[in-house]
Image (tube, helix red, strand yellow):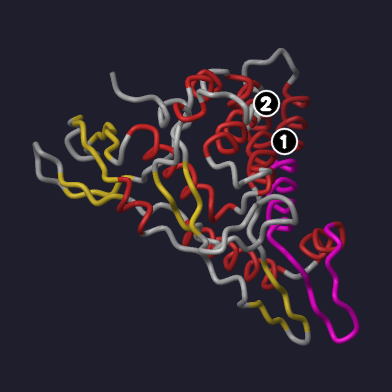
């Protein structure tokens, strides 16, 4: 922005201030401009931000989300480095700052299939977002394993790989390949799923401490997951999933207006509609 512009007083101003679930931890140097109080300003979206969210390619590769976050939360200098535990809090805050705290969503009862429109107070969602305790380690014999949150870059890259692999699997039955070739391609795709899973888990490992070494190199950590025994692998995987569950938006408990059936519905931040106000 041009500091000499006499129209600056008409520019958007922060709509709300939030604290990050991570308390500003787990950001690499230069990715976050911390504040003395831990409160971060959140600006409403601009028209350019809304246009950005309607660009399919930018949505798919995560660039749209990065651009909008850095526009609306200027203290976040590199949104690719946001720890996963902060992503929902940041996106919910931008939604509140731009369109208010009430968000409508559609739901379908799993019992009677009846459809209805509901609304949710995003302030309550934001209040309940928690951060996992990454000071706790996993112990296995004389080895101690320390975890860390994945970054938005990690999440986006892994999602793209999963999407591309799943798309390939869906195309196999209708392809012109022979049966043996189809079996081979399917086997390769299933192997790729395993590789993606191991890679994603390794990105949640910060360090492994042994009596003789402190290992932080990503390639060594990934190799550990590939060659450790099943018990240790499952222990690491389950602990990572538990940490992930702590930081996720909790499902809503709903009661069907028609048949009174009670059910839970997961709240997802669908980027194609989350930042588009109802018309």
Q: Which residues are magenta?
A: 190-218
- Give the percent coordinates (x, y) of residue 268: 41, 41
- Give the percent coordinates (x, y) of residue 197: 68, 50
Residue furthest to the top in view is 176
- Give the percent coordinates (x, y) of residue 115: 20, 29
Answer with left or right where residue 73 lies relative to residue 96: right
Answer with left or right where residue 258 lies relative to residue 144: left
Q: Check disc 1 and report the residue beneath it.
A: 189
Residue 30 is one of the magenta-drawn residues = no
Viewport quadrant of the N terminus: top right
| Residue at point 89%, 79% (across, down) | 213
Pick whichever of labels 1 and 2 is earlier in the sequence: 2
Residue nearer the viewer, 191 or 243: 243
Whether residue 187 is situated above or below residue 216 in the rendered picture: above
| Residue at point 34%, 32% (across, down) | 99
Viewport quadrant of the C terminus: top left
Label 1 Cα crowd, 10 Å radius (few <14 / some 14-19 / many 20+): some
SS label for mark 1? helix
| Residue at point 67%, 41% (across, down) | 158
Q: Are marks 1 and 2 in contact (CB under 8 Å)?
A: yes
Whether residue 113 is situated above or below residue 37 in the rendered picture: above
- Give the percent coordinates (x, y) of residue 135: 62, 76
SS label for mark 2? helix
Q: Check disc 2 and report the residue beneath it.
A: 168
């Amino acid at each position: 922005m041009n500091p000499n512009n006499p129209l600056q007083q008409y520019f958007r101003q922060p709509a709300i201030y939030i604290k990050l679930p991570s308390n500003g931890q787990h950001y690499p140097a230069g990715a976050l401009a911390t504040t003395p109080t831990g409160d971060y300003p959140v600006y409403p979206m601009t028209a350019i931000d809304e246009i950005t969210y309607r660009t399919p390619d930018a949505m798919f590769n995560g660039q749209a989300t990065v651009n909008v976050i850095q526009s609306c939360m200027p203290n976040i200098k590199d949104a690719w480095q946001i720890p996963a535990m902060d992503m929902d809090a940041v996106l919910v805050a931008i939604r509140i700052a731009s369109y208010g705290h009430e968000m409508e969503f559609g739901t379908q009862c799993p019992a009677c299939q009846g459809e209805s429109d509901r609304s949710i107070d995003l302030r309550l969602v934001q209040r309940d977002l928690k951060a996992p305790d990454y000071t706790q380690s996993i112990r296995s014999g004389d080895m101690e394993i320390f975890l860390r949150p994945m970054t938005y870059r990690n999440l986006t890259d892994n999602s793209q790989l999963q999407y591309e692999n799943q798309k390939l699997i869906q195309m196999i039955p209708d392809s012109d390949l022979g049966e043996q070739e189809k079996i081979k391609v399917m086997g390769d795709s299933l192997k790729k799923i395993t590789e993606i899973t191991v890679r994603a888990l390794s990105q949640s490992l910060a360090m492994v401490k042994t009596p003789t070494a402190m290992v932080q190199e990503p390639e060594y950590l990934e190799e550990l997951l590939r060659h450790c025994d099943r018990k240790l692998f499952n222990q690491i995987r389950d602990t990572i999933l538990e940490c992930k569950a702590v930081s996720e938006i909790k499902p809503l408990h709903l009661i069907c207006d028609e048949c009174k059936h009670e059910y839970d519905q997961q709240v997802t931040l669908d980027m194609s509609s989350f930042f588009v106000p109802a018309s």
